[in-house]
Image: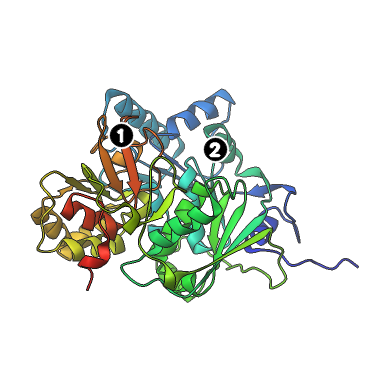
Amino acid sequence: MSILMGMTITEKILARASGKKEVSAGELVVAKVDVAMIHDFTGPMTVKALKAMGAPGVWDPSRVVVIFDHQVPASSLNAAEFHKMLRAFVKEHGITNFYDVGRGGICHQIMPEEGFVVPGSVIVGADSHTTTYGALGAFATGLGSTDMAAAIATGELWFRVPETLKVQVDGKVRPPVSAKDLTLAIIGIVKADGATYKAVEYSGEGVKDLSIEGRLTMCNMAVEMGAKNGIVEPDAKTEAFLKGRARFPYQPVKSDPDANYEKEVRLEADKLEPVVACPHSVDNVKVVVEVEGIEVDQAFIGSCTNGRLEDLEVAAKILKGRKVHPRTRLVVIPASQRIYHEATKRGLIEIFVEAGAMVCNPTCGPCLGSHLGILGDGETCISAANRNFIGRMGSPKSKVYLASPATVAASAIEGKITDPRKYWS
């Protein structure tokens, strides 16, 4: 008689999806996919791969989600043609979960916001930051276009079960220190390649204290450590978020007490200060006071990392009654139409505009150097997005510092990297 060994939450999800009682790290499994997502930037390549492999269609149109977000509205003739191709694909295959220009927002906000993400599910997306959805207790990972085509055609895909790195966060962050600061601090410890093809399981008092928005930020940046997925065990906050929005029935999954972890990292959230990831690597993390005074040409608040309502509220609190520095431009982009609408009702958009910010439609925009804030030679940006490698936001001669919305807002006011605590009361 075999005795089942303890499993992590990631192992349990992959075991269930592959019809097994148990799996272990390193094992290869063929798992059923619950939801597959493509967007306007990678979707066309997926469609081409589908046609090349002779796939007759998609395995389940109700489980495929198509979202326009990277170049919205179309920023070039090439982008417009991509949009046309995907609109035709959606129509041909009867895909109803389609979020066109002005009807959705950034894919990694829309997926949880619209209820496509539920605990215990397997979700794949043709984008590396698909790891975001682990905040709701799902196994979610990014795929290349060919793998995505296979997943969309068959409804299943093979995975190597990842080893799990446990990140234990003790204590609670003290505002204006936020989930973004905590996330950058973790990456500074683990390093950009320290969790390659691993599951990063976030736990402890500091994680439980975070809002769902904060957890989405953490899991979003798991891939910046090289992780296959990031994940948080579902709890009462998860249930509250899903109430009235979950599109599918679900069974929450939690790690066993005797689960095997490859490594554990611990840190104390209540001792954290605001931090900044300096050029040109996300793990080049320094306390903000070490880099205060560096002049910035642009400040950016938005993206799938920090364009949520909570982020906009924090930024607005700092910017209210103040002005963006004359030498600096501030770009603010809500992550979805719903967030944009709510921010308008709460007066946040008015605060940004009166401060001298440019508020743009929900899109990835400057995060990937696509449009709405591309950097020129020699320019410096402080950004609430997720990547700062050479050329990420435009010119390879520009520099990007990553920070929280609070730090970005404070820096926009002074025209230089600034500790947000001086504006927090």
Type of amino acid at the residue the image marks with label 2: Met
Residue positioned most to the right: 1
According to the picture, the residue beneath numbered tag 2 turns out to be 148
Is residue 35 something one can see in this rendering?
no
Q: Quadrant of the C terminus?
A: bottom left
* Local SS, label 1: loop
Q: Position of residue 385 (x, y in %)?
A: 35, 48
Question: Looking at the image, is mark 2 or mark 1 earlier in the sequence?
Answer: 2
Question: Residue 234, labelled with which disc?
Answer: none
Q: Which quarter of the picture shows residue 90?
A: top left
According to the picture, the residue beneath numbered tag 1 turns out to be 398
In this rendering, the answer to whether 342 lies above or below 380 is below
* Local SS, label 2: helix
Q: Position of residue 30 (x, y in %)?
A: 69, 46
In this rendering, the answer to whether 289 lies above or below 141 is below
* Residue at figure coordinates x 58%, y 26% from the top left: 54
Type of amino acid at the residue the image marks with label 1: Ser
Q: Residues within 10 Å of mark 2 (few under 14, many from 20)?
A: many
Cα–Cα gap, marks 2 and 1: 33 Å
Closest to the observer, 172 or 354: 172
Q: Quadrant of the N terminus?
A: bottom right
Q: Position of residue 134 (x, y in %)?
A: 51, 58
Closest to the observer, 118 or 358: 358
Closest to the observer, 54 or 75: 75
In this rendering, the answer to whether 5 lies above or below 361 is below
